[in-house]
Image (cartoon, helix red, strand yellow):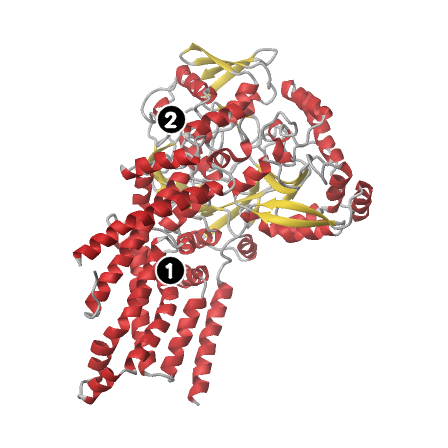
Amino acid sequence: MKSSRVLILLASVMLIGALLGACAPAPAAPATQPPAVATQPATAAVAPTGAPAATQQPVAGQPKMGGTVTFGMKEDVTSMDPLKAIQYGDIRLNILVAQQLVAPDRAGKFVGVLAETWDTSPDGKTWTFHLRKGVKFHNGQEMSADDVKWVFDHIMDPKSGAVMASTYKAIGLTTEVVDNYTIKFMISSGMGPFLSYLALLNRSAIIHRDSYNADGSVSKMIGTGPFMMVSSKPGDSYTLQKFPDYWKKGQPYLDQVVLKVVTDPSARLNAIRTGDVDMTEDLPIAEVKNLSKTPDPNFTVNVYYINSDERLVMNNTRAPFNNKNARLAVEYALDRNQYNDAIFFGLGQVHNQAFVPDNLWYLDVPMIKPDLSKAKEYFKASGLPEGTKVKMLLMPNQTDRTEVIQAMLGQIGFQVEFDTVDSAAWTNQGKAYNFDLLLGTMTGIFDPDRPYGYLQKSSSSNWLVGGYDTPQMNDLLNAGRSETDVNKRKDIYKQVVQLVQDDAATMYVVGLPWVEAWRNTVKGYQSGTSPALLMMDASDGLNVTWLDK
Amino acid sequence: MLAYLVRRVIGLLPILVMMSVIVFVLIRLVPGDPIDVMYGSEGMDTARRAALSHELGLDQSIVVQYGRWVWRAVHGDLGNSYRASMPVVSLIGQRLPATLLLAGTALVISLLIAVPLGVLAAVRRNSWVDFSALGFAIFGISLPNFWAGMVLVLIFAVWLHWLPAIGYVSPARNLGQFLADLILPALTLGWSLSGTTTRLARSSMLEELGKDYVRTARGKGLREETVLLVHGLRNALIPLITMVGLQLGFLLGGVVVVEAVFAWPGIGLLVVDSIFARDYPVVQGVVLVVAVMVVLVNLMVDILYTIVDPRIRLG
């Protein structure tokens, strides 16, 4: 009798525990997952065909001044130096503190940020920028052409380690101060994408030289943005306060922004539910699906699209994928829609190029439809034996792709073996071409030169498209880079996209869905055209966000 | 005793040297270096990579790099974090208090649960109390930390809104908020630690209760509470102290999963993130500091033995 009571008690405890566990959100989800209630139509970084419609409209009513917004960000900042920043966490911080000369607006047109206007010589090799007057750095000093020149000289200094150095060196960039508010940029090539290089906020930000310590490191950025740095606790939080002398008068409305590092997706979801953060990003996809059916009354989840891609990269430099038939077999075997359903719950944008559909640079190149019999024919034509082993390099946040990739490629004769490594090892092995397959992602795309420019050996990122390089592609890319007429560039890049597909150079699979969520007390915020908290062109974002509490 | 303590502290040196060599070499054997992390997919031409490698000292031989690092370390300089651009000592100083506070509180919670439960289970052997305690212990040992944490957050933060889901604020800044932030992560850890400790307390207590001196004490008419707590428990504490010492050493290295679930800025996440980022100075510095702390904890455990059991002499 006693023992039966004990057994019942124990069983009850276990059952309660199991039920509670079933209710708990999944602890870890892949990084590029988009859970959302509202799905925005594609918003474009460069889209003169029409301004994209946003489902979020600014709330009517006077903004209230003051308050602190806490944003739960998924990654830590990896560099306080914006000229070296490449990760999402870096962008989220930098974009509030520092600004660039030009940037794309919501319609995708390049507009001035710190530059008011600019002139271009007929050959596109000389650009004269007229700087905005009265723009102050956070240390009180007014921005001048000297400051801008200093930044670009610093980028070009081999010791600086700036990310854009190789690009600017390749186009032969030099600068010349004309007067206090006018600066000339001279280039020998790269006229087509030049403005997009300047627009990359996290690589060409105009920060004050006093940001740099004697050893070249940056402890505290001194920029021109609406918020200035107060304190940084790496791995924990970054506190920024309103810059009272911000050049856009009346902004920002908030007194303070706290960027809180919350690396676990479920923890971010719990934090937005409880109000421990006011805004956050990248929630577990399974939970977002639930939220789309049963929205939470206290916060809004928004999924939006920007120019970005997840692509399947085949190593063109070694067997088996140096064989075009083998690559074509993969191209016809991989069903993008099924992949999207399996990985992104249908929320990604299936595509064959890195631009969203309503973007200027989205080109009319019909996408190959999956065809299993064709895939098998190409596999047979490749001469590869059934069960050919291929090694796929994965990062930890990509391991959920293994089943669908193995299933799709397995049915045509490949046997995929997966090697999961951390991002540093992934980069190291990728650059050494020690892989057959990998998955690449890219964001911050405003000009076709950025994704497609990788498709030639002269690009230091050529490994990210599997080392593909052909004379025909080289000619097209060089032509696209030198051409300034937009329509002519579109023709060129249309041929590029077609060639990528015909040669199965690499395979653009899906445009990533991006997710942000905010408590309903947060007003005025709209998700942007980049994973950022401030519109690239300084028009709206956290600088026009206010708290209704 | 003093001579013993001096010998133990001196004995720390070869341990630190060995640890530092192992970590120094191991982290550099892993594919990928800090430059790969900093620039990732963006690429960098050979000349600039060489310049940056030289600036970071990565182009030197591993022996030279180690020698330079040791020379600076003995002068109290553990170098600068590549990512945070701040001294490693400052970075550790920022994160260590959170780990110490969480570890200490979790241990106290685990002992408050485990010792009474273990003693009760031993005294009421083969009763429902005993079986419940054993069930609780097995549950605690088997329970993944992240699951336990998530469940506690769900109940107490999301549903009941009694406690925050994430966060950390220094106790000096806001003691009330700090305590509120501390409860759930400390309970999560304490719960999982208490499983093992409960079982050990039970078995240790059972062993003592079977000994002659306990029978003698009862035979002399001492109250049962005195027999159990003054005589039995005191002797049963020795293995428990050993266990607590081991657990504290483990906790001082940081508990990554709990820190991630609660966004608790401790040493665990710092060292894991630094390994992924190939932030060599931080990894080396943290391992060194944690090694020192673990050795000191073991020393304290040895001293505690002598207090609990006068038969034990050190030296």
Taking the image as drawn, is residue A294 in sight? yes
Residue at the top extreme, as displayed:
A178
The residue carrying pointer 1 sits among few (fewer than 14), some (14 to 19) or many (20 or more) residues within 10 Å by Cα, namely some
Q: Amino acid at mark 1?
A: His
Residue A300 screen position, x and y as percent: 49, 49
Residue in the foreground of this view, choosing between B24 and B277: B24
Foreground disc of the pair 1, 2: 2
Residue A126 screen position, x and y as percent: 55, 12
Q: Name the residue: 32% across, 25% down.
A: A139
Left/right placement of residue A195 relative to residue A506 reads left
Q: Amino acid at mark 2?
A: Gly
Q: Secondary structure at mark 2?
A: loop
Residue in the foreground of this view, choosing between B5 and A289: B5
The chain letter for the residue carrying disc 1 is B
Image quadrant where residue A493 sits: top right
Q: Are marks 1 and 2 in contact (CB under 8 Å)?
A: no
Residue in the foreground of this view, choosing between A448 and A467: A467
Rendered image: mark on residue B161: 1
Q: Looking at the rendering, in which quadrant would you find the N terminus of chain A?
A: bottom left
Q: Secondary structure at mark 1?
A: loop
The chain letter for the residue carrying disc 2 is A
Asked if A33 appears above or below A457 in the picture, the reply is below
Taking the image as drawn, is residue A307 in sight? no
Asked if A47 appears above or below A28 in the picture, the reply is above
Q: CA distance from mark 1 to mark 2?
A: 46 Å
Residue A405 screen position, x and y as percent: 67, 49
Left/right placement of residue A84 relative to residue B68 reads right
Left/right placement of residue A80 relative to residue A516 reads left
Residue B211 screen position, x and y as percent: 27, 82
Q: Are marks 1 and 2 on the same chain?
A: no
The residue carrying pointer 2 sits among few (fewer than 14), some (14 to 19) or many (20 or more) residues within 10 Å by Cα, namely some
Residue denoted by label 2: A216
